[in-house]
Every structure is written in C-alpha cells, then in structure tokens.
C-alpha cells in the first residue's frame, strides 16, 4: 500500500517567481494492494509530475510518501526501484537498444539487488527466460541474443512491461505506455498489461490519454486537474462510466476532446 | 634492421600495441560511458613521467607500474566526483583534471625524465634474453613484442570479462541510458565513477608502458593523445564493422596498428616536416570520423539507384 500525503510541487523557472508553475497542489491518494488505477487529466494537470515523484525522479516540495508504512519520501530513485517497476511512454527508454534481450532481462531480474562479479546470466536463467517468453507467442524465446533495437515498438513495450513486473514489485508505474504505439499494437499491449497486472496482483498506477482504456481497464479511475485530484471513482461506479459522461463531467476542461482523447 | 623495416614493420606494431591499451581506456569512457574524457591528455604523460621517476628513485618497475595504476584509479574517481557528484560538465571536468596534471608533471622532475642506460624496466629482462639469441635491435623488438602482447592479452581479457559480469553489464547500461538505469535500481553516479576509474587505470598503464619502452618521457607526450585514441577507435570500427563486444575489442588492436602504420608511412613522404604532426593527426581523425557516414550515404545512394533500375 502506498500512501501519498499532501504532496506539493512547484517548478521554478529562471529563479523568477513570475515563471513559477504549480504542478501539484496538495495531492492525497492511497493506492491499496488490489488497486489498478487509471489516471486521466489534460496536459499540465500534474499526472506525470505525480508519477515522477512516486518513482523518485523528482523530489516533492512538501508532503510524504509511505510505502507499507515506511517513509520513502527522500529515498533516491535507484533505491526505490527495488519496490517499484516502471514503464515509460517512449519504448526506447524502457530498455537498452544497444544491448541484447537477455542482457536487458538479466538487468531487470537484478533490480534492487547487488551487482557482483558473477557472469551477467546463467544457463538456468536463460532457460527460465525462454520459458517465460514462449507463452507470449511472439517468438521471443529464440531471439534472446538479438539486440533490443531490432524489436518493434510493441514488442519492446511488452518486454519492458514484463521486465518491470519482475520480482513482484510493490507498485507498477505505467506512464502513458501505449501512447507511442499504433492503435492496434496499443490495444494488444494494453490487454497484455491487464493480464499481467491481474496475474501478479500488482498495485498499479497507470497514466493514460485514452479515456476508453481508462474506463475499460482497472478497478479505479482518477482525474487530475491543475495539480489536484478532482474525481476518484471505483467499482460499480467506474463500470458505469461512459466517455460521454466523463466528457460532460469535465466539459469545463477545454483540453477534453469529443473523441475521448485527453 | 634497416630503417624502412623499422618504420613500417616493427615500430607501428609496437606503438600500435601500446596505444591499443590507451585506446581501450578511451573506449571504456567514450564508447561505454559516452563521456569524452579529456583528462587522459594530462594523465598519460603524468603516468609516464611518474613511473620513470619511480624507477630512477630505485623502485622496482612493477612497483612503478602499480604507482601509476593507483594514480590512474584516483584520477578516474576524481573525474567521476567532478562530473557526477559536483555536476560539472564532463568535458570541463576533464579539462580541469588535465590542467592539474600538467602542473603535477612539471613538479615530478620538471616534466622531463629519462632513464640511464641499463636501467631496469618491465621490458629490460626479456629484451636481454632475446638479445642473447639474435642481434641487438631484433632482440629488443622481440622482447618488447612479447611483453606488449602479454599486456594486451591480459588487459583485453580482463576488460572483456569484467564487462560481461553483472557489475560490468550494469555499467554498460548506465552509459547507454541514465533514466533506464535508475529505474532498474542502478546507482548512476557511483557506477559512472567506477567506469571512469577503469578507463583511467588503462590510460595510466599505457602511459607507464610507453615511458618504460621509450626510457624517457616529457610533458609534451600528452598533446593530441585523445585524438589518437579516438582515431584508433574509429579506424578499428571502419576495418571491422561488426558490433559485438568481442569484435569491438579486436577492432581496437587492429585500429591501433593501422593508425601507426599510416602515420609512419606519412612520415616517409619526401618533404615531411615533424611540425606538421598534429595538423596531420587532426586531418586524419576528421577523415576517419567522416568515412562511416560517407559510406552509409554511398550505400543508400546505390540501393536507391538499384531500386530505380528495377522500377524502370
């Protein structure tokens, strides 16, 4: 369980208060162990800042983060990685193109562990990866020694997801992870995401621009606006949501387009 | 041994081997960590001068080498601290260290040191063994070749092994993508500093070997060294355009040899003036840097041409 308590963040530009941008203005959110939360909100609503603060890429000005009761507010990003899996929007960021698939997998498998002088992969480990990859039906198990950059965007994003879910993290952060893919591939990666999150029962926070996905996936939906959470619903209420209803609800928000893409 | 054999066969081979160790150091910083580390221009001559100073002071050559290795390690760590912890741009951090090393090199024997004849070096014992079998010049060459081949095999083997370990793989990941590395729980600052330390140790070893091989060293040694290292990397990549780590390493040794072969050949051109050396180096590295993209352009032009031919 992650408790986000009264987080604020202001970005200062050129040391001139006139340029200050208040990204988060007191955000409170508790991510329970069974939560798969879809976060929607327009550009500048603070959803990416919130995700970056949870991951540790950005330090908040005030407020605290409690993971299973333990204060992780000041824990550096690389030390949080032990508990947090993350998938970026850019498929090129979530894995290393110049390294092979098995090198990428072995790095993810050692997330939060000591990196010693043993060989980066063992024979058993290689077999385990093959067993893990073959059910995906993408013929990845035979391509372990291929460079990551030779895989398609969809394959890379699916693999990054798989890597982020290694070692059962206490939280999975998805940052518009299908936004850079074509619609068909995005749908495939999204349903793979759902499958993986359900199977591992990983608490998940997913930012998306796609309202349809936000309604279809997860048990809970929150909407952010001007650095605050302005709408939070779950369960049956969420199931009853429609794109029209969401658009209507936030008609005042001029970033909402009728096609359901924020 | 006549002078043509010396300038086209033996010298380029030995120089190529020494500089391939240097290039390996530059490869670690430039290709693995993605940092152009200028400090090598100061560290290389300092390491050469320091190891010769130590030998003149009565140190065993192995201890002199270890002293240089220690200095190299510290230099790399310092570079990492300046760049990663004090957030100084890598290029500037390298220049800061390079400048500091120039002063240190002058402090140690005024920046110019040479060994008296018959001094003990890492080469001398094995040279003497070969000298007893063949002529003096060939004996020296064979002895130097054996020592340098051993050093190259050992160091390249170590680097190949290390960057295949968990720790080495983590450093490679850091060099490619900081955001990914942090998300995978890697301490970017610490691992970058460690990688720079490994790079600088290799530079320092190259410096000490070069000094002992020449039995003299001056502060002027450092000038243009980064260019030589980079040219070696690029030349090797042109000669062996495969991308696996192993072939990358092999290409460095080939690149080192090619570099000195070509540069030695240039000195034989009638009217060559040693004052042109750095100018020639600069032009040379520009050419080898441009060749890969030039080759790509030609290839895409040819394939376009072929397509057009098919469609016509």
Image (spheres, rainbow, N blue to C red):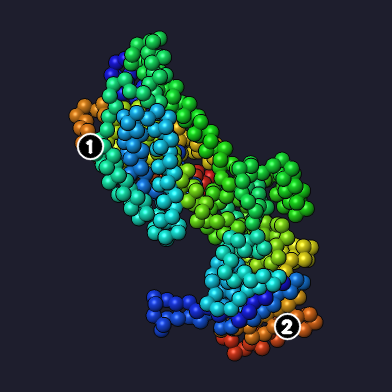
Crowd around label 2: few <14 · some 14–19 · many ≥20 (10 Å): some
Q: Is residue B111 left or right of residue B65?
A: left
Q: Is residue B310 left or right of residue B17?
A: right
Q: Which residue is mark 2?
A: A233
Disc 1 is attached to a residue of which chain?
A: B
Q: Position of residue A142 (x, y in %)?
A: 71, 44
Q: Is residue B250 left or right of residue B220?
A: right
Which residue is depicted at the point 64% across and 86% down?
A230
Q: Is there a contact, CB below 8 Å, between mark 2 and mark 1?
A: no
Image disc number at residue B227: none
Q: Is residue A197 visible?
A: yes
Q: Position of residue B119 (x, y in %)?
A: 33, 23
Where's the N terminus of chain A, which quadrant? bottom right
Q: Quarter-wise, where is residue B216 in the image?
A: top left
- Of residues A223 and A52, the one drawn nearer to the viewer in this rendering: A52
- Callout 1: helix, strand or loop? helix
Q: Position of residue B188 (x, y in %)?
A: 52, 56
Q: Quarter-wise, where is residue A241 in the image?
A: bottom right
- Of residues A103 and A136, the one drawn nearer to the viewer in this rendering: A103
Q: Which residue is mark 1?
A: B276
Q: Position of residue A253 (x, y in %)?
A: 59, 86
């Amino acid at each position: 369980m992650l408790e986000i308590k009264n987080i604020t963040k202001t970005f200062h530009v050129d040391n001139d208060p006139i340029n200050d941008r208040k990204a988060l203005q007191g955000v409170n959110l508790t991510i329970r162990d069974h939560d798969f939360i879809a976060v929607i909100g327009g550009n500048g609503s603070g959803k990416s800042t919130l995700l970056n603060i949870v991951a540790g890429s950005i330090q908040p000005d005030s407020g605290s983060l409690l993971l299973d009761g333990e204060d992780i507010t000041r824990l550096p990003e690389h030390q949080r990685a032990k508990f947090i899996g993350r998938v970026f929007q850019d498929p090129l960021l979530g894995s290393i193109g110049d390294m092979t698939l098995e090198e990428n997998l072995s790095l993810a498998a050692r997330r939060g562990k000591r990196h010693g002088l043993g060989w980066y992969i063992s024979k058993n480990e290689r077999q385990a990866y093959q067993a893990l990859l073959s059910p995906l039906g993408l013929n990845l198990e035979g391509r372990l020694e291929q460079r990551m950059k030779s895989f398609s965007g969809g394959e890379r994003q699916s693999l990054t997801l798989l890597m982020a879910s290694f070692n059962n993290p206490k939280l999975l952060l998805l940052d518009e992870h299908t936004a850079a893919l074509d619609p068909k591939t995005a749908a495939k990666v999204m349903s793979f995401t759902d499958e993986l999150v359900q199977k591992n029962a990983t608490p998940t926070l997913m930012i998306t621009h796609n309202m349809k996905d936000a309604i279809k996936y997860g048990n809970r939906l929150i909407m952010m606006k001007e650095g605050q959470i302005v709408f939070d619903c779950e369960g049956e209420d969420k199931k009853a949501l429609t794109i029209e209803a969401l658009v209507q609800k936030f008609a005042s928000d001029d970033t909402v387009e009728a096609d359901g893409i924020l | 041994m006549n002078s043509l054999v010396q300038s086209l066969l033996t010298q380029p081979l030995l120089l190529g081997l020494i500089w391939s160790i240097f290039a390996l150091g530059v490869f670690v910083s430039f290709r693995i960590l993605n940092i152009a580390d200028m400090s090598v221009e100061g560290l290389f001559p300092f390491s050469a001068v320091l190891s010769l100073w130590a030998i003149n002071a009565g140190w065993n050559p192995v201890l002199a080498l270890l002293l240089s290795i220690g200095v190299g390690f510290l230099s790399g760590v310092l570079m990492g601290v300046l760049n990663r912890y004090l957030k100084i741009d890598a290029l500037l951090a390298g220049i800061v260290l390079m400048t500091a090393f120039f002063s240190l090199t002058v402090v140690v024997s005024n920046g110019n040191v040479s060994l008296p004849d018959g001094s003990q070096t890492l080469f001398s014992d094995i040279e003497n063994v070969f000298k007893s079998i063949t002529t003096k010049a060939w004996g020296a060459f064979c002895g130097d070749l054996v020592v340098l081949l051993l050093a190259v095999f050992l160091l390249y083997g170590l680097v190949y092994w290390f960057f295949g370990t968990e720790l080495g793989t983590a450093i490679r990941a850091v060099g490619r993508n900081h955001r990914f590395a942090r998300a995978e729980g890697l301490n970017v600052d610490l691992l970058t500093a460690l990688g720079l330390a490994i790079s600088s140790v290799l530079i320092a070893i190259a410096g000490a070997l070069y000094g002992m091989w020449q039995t003299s060293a001056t502060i002027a040694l450092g000038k243009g060294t980064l260019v030589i290292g980079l040219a070696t990397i690029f030349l090797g990549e042109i000669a062996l355009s495969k991308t696996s780590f192993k072939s990358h390493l092999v290409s460095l040794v080939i690149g080192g040899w090619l570099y000195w072969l070509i540069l030695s050949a240039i000195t034989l051109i009638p009217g060559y003036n040693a004052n042109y050396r750095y100018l020639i180096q600069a032009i040379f590295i520009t050419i080898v840097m441009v060749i890969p993209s030039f080759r790509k352009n030609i290839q895409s032009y040819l394939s376009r041409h072929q397509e057009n031919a098919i469609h016509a």
